[in-house]
Image (cartoon, helix red, strand yellow):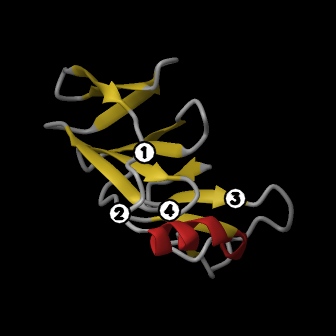
Amino acid sequence: ITGSSDCGIYLWSPTGPHTFSDSIAFEGHTGPVTALALSHDGSMLVSASGDKTVRVWCMTSGELLDVKLHKDWVSCLYVTSDNCLMTGSHDRHVRRFARLVRPPSKSTSTKKQQLNGTANRPKAMSSPIV
């Protein structure tokens, strides 16, 4: 998993030629991605950005689960052993947020789609790396 100055987050295949076509993109940040962390069970990805936000993503569906705000660039983050989120920002604040908890799925059909990988999958990139 990598974060980029192009505002993207990419989940790469461990095999293959490592082109964008082999990656899955989590899109939503409007500033450079400055830090990434996984929840302890690996079900959620947390990203920090120069757009003053921290975003929580579902790793299986790519769904954006939550957005936390700072007043300036968010430069670092950490997920504690009990799944609390700690963030640091250029606004000179370190914040501790409540435990990261995945919300229950909205419907049975959505849950089935999530289980078979058809609901809100992150977009696969199609451009080669230059």
- Tell me the CA gap for discs 1 and 2: 19 Å
Q: Is residue 122 left or right of residue 95?
A: right
Q: Residue 62 carries which label?
A: 4
Q: Which of 98 and 48 is in front in this view?
A: 98
Name the secondary structure under disc 1.
loop
Q: Which amino acid does label 3 sit on?
A: Trp
Q: Where is residue 37 in the image (x, y as percent from the top left)?
A: 52, 36
CB contact under 8 Å: marks 1 and 4: no
Q: Which amino acid does label 4 sit on?
A: Gly
Which residue bears the numbered disc 1?
102
Q: In this view, does 121 lie above or below 49?
A: below
Q: Nearer the viewer, mark 3 or mark 4?
A: 4
Looking at the image, which residue is at 53% across and 63% down?
61
> Viewer-nearest of labels 3 and 1?
1
Task: Name the front one of labels 1 and 4.
Answer: 1
Residue 85 locus on image (x, y percent):
37, 27
Q: Earlier in the sequence, mark 4 or mark 2?
A: 2
Residue at numbered disc 3: 12
The location of residue 105, given as percent across then percent down, is 42, 59
- Quadrant housing the C terminus: bottom right
Spatial CA span between label 3 and label 2: 18 Å
- Ranked by sequence position, the earlier of labels 3 and 1 is 3
